[in-house]
Amino acid sequence: MKVVVLGAGLMGKEVARDLVASPSVESVFLADLNVELAEQFVATLNTDKVEVVKLNAECEKDLRAVIAKGDVAVNALFYAFNERVARAAIDAGVHAVDLGGHIGGITETILQLNEEAVKNNVTIIPDLGVAPGMVNILTGYGASKLEKLESIKLFVGGIPTEPKPPLHYTRVFSLDGVFDHYTEPSKMITKGKLTEVPSLTGIEPIYFDQFGVLEAFYTSGGISTLYKTYPDVKTLEYKTIRYKGHAEKFKLLADLGFLSKDNFVEVGGQQVSVRDVAREALKKKLDLGKKVDAVLLRAIIAGEKSQEQITYEYEMVIKKDVEANVTAMARATANTISVVAQMIGNGVITNRGVHAPETVVPGREFIEEMVKRGVVIKEISHRSSMIVKW
């Protein structure tokens, strides 16, 4: 198969690295506006599988032409491009996956392209990062083992292994993305009803070995399409994991307007975005550099089967690969989207149209493929007998 990777940023590079290692991948086109930086990376791979191509993602003609080079396109651009890429891929008759960014209805809009994708014999799967993405696949896998699904509780976080004050956090993806997840409302289902709660609220303790007691709180985007796929559950919630005190500090910044897209002030006769200033100031403070990051995940899927209450719990703890200099977030995210892209290209996934990850990605095969890449996802099940009333 031929795969086009759109974007040679951190995630795009790691996707390309994984694709190169796959015997079923014939060639990879790594597309970016900055050709020189992309070529410098490719030179480190010691392969002739990768061709660097120039891409101006703002130009739809250019975007379609680049996508048309592959059988599958992996969109590793900022999520503002997701709808544009999906439309271009459908027009070109090329399968496509993206890293998500379930903010402002982007994924809902892509799902509405289903009929066009079916007509063009194309598979589009959005939201294939860690959350959304990996958590969706694991939820679908757990749900497939139950006769009745009742509860979905998801916890995910990217954190430094050696936290430093005052925020005890290092950025492992776009701060604009972090700000969006912290300021948009979080969808959830509670007592069977769909509702929204403010992000950075609902703080609760959560324990992981090696890390001790951390905190988890609501943020937007994490449940992605799950509320549509499983509308009848009693409980559905997603929380982000951080070190204790993180949510309170970022909520203060949010309450003061530092994270708002609409907050402008006049400085020296010029209109200045407060959010832009906050982002650039925090970039310096939160730079990962050579520090080691970790990604923690816990997905708890509960329901009924054969008159028993059963809970499937999926847990992942991975750290930066120091030897290869690949962050934990890149290992988890890039491998997830690469594995699913290859499943489409290899014919493991044959459903055409636009599909949520939890509905078409086979969970067992996904977990097996991730293990091959050093990303181990453990499954634990709990059972308890039900009392049947006659």
Image (cartoon, grey):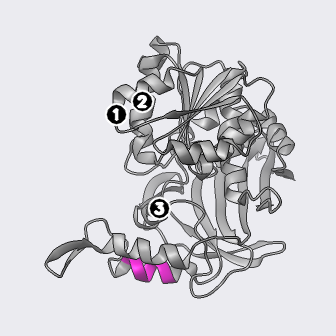
Identify the residue at image location x=59%, y=84%.
245
Residue that extends furthest to the left in the rendered view of this protein: 269
Which mark's residue is nearer the viewer, 3 or 1?
Answer: 1
Please tell me whether mark 2 sits on a helix, a strand or a loop: helix
Instruction: In the rendered view, tell whether residue 280 sits above or below residue 93.
Output: below
Instruction: In the rendered view, tell whether residue 212 sits above or below residue 11.
Output: below
Looking at the picture, how far across and down is residue 216, in whole percent? 62, 71
Looking at the picture, how far across and down is residue 146, in whole percent? 75, 39
CA separation in Å, label 3 and label 1: 28 Å
Stretch in magenta:
249-254
Does the residue at mark 2 contact the one at mark 1 (Cβ under 8 Å)? yes
Does the magenta stretch mainly form a helix, a strand or a loop?
A: helix
* Quadrant location of the C terminus in the rendered image: top right
Residue 181's tag is 3
* Quadrant location of the N terminus in the rendered image: top right
Identify the residue at image location x=77%, y=39%.
46
Which mark's residue is nearer the viewer, 2 or 3?
Answer: 2
Amino acid at the residue labelled 1? Cys
Residue 59's tag is 1
CA separation in Å, label 2 and label 3: 27 Å
